[in-house]
Image (cartoon, rainbow, N blue to C red):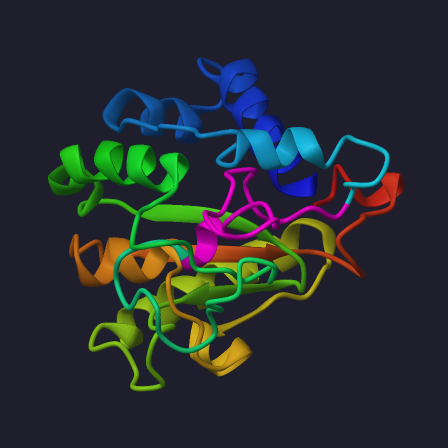
Amino acid sequence: WITSGALNWILAHVLENYGTDPRLTRIVDTMDLPFNLVANPDGYQQSHTPLGRMWRKNRTPSPGSTCIGTDPNRNWPAGWGGGGASTDPCSDAFRGSGPSSTPMVTNILRYVSNRAENIRQAAFYDHHSFGNFLISPSGFTTTPAPDYPAMAAAMSDMCDAITAEHGTPYDYGSIASWFGVASGGSINTTYTDLGIIHSYASELRGPGFIVPFSEVTET
């Protein structure tokens, strides 16, 4: 739950400090800041059930299988069906029946696509957990993204800023450099198909998916 919690904290910080923090006020006055606080609502709801705390996928039934759900982060179209995604509906990394076959990916992609020209001037950012690092494309291939030098410079600055805030070290690299080939992720599509160079995902602080309460605010 740390990802949606972190986004809620960021949004609250923006709302509470607008008009008093000059830098934040300037950002809000000159940019759109869309927040999607829960990208996988039915999966998030399932994670609040007694046996579903670590649920990852959505809750869409898979035709021909008794297993439930598709991994939305293996369902985005760029590189869909490649390495790191499963064809097994019972797998946590199930890629789905086709690219963008989940409602959440379809709707988020439509929203971002309609605003891609504006977002290219800024960034697309996807919160994940866990590991204390930032990642960029590419994920469906080990070949470095053509714009990786610019991505690396931005991620380095972000890591320095995060570490300076609470002393928590963060690292960075491409998806493939951390996980190996992992196809179907959001930032692969926002970069490859929509041309948003600054497409990043975070792996928020650990030491696991369940973050101690004492570390929630610092995250």
Work out whether 75 lies above or below 60: below
Q: Which residues are magenta?
A: 54-74
Residue under the point 75% across and 48% down: 54
- In the foreground, 50 or 209: 50
Residue under the point 38% across and 72% down: 139
Work out whether 25 lies above or below 98: above
Q: Position of residue 217 (x, y in %)?
A: 75, 37
Q: Position of residue 63 (x, y in %)?
A: 45, 47
Label tally: 0
Q: Position of residue 46 (x, y in %)?
A: 69, 33
Left or right, residue 14 beside residue 123? right
Left or right, residue 5 beside residue 51? left
Quadrant of the frame with the C terminus:
top right
Left or right, residue 9 beside residue 62? right
Please identify the dominant SS of the magenta region. loop
Quadrant of the frame with the N terminus:
top right
- In the foreground, 29 or 20: 29
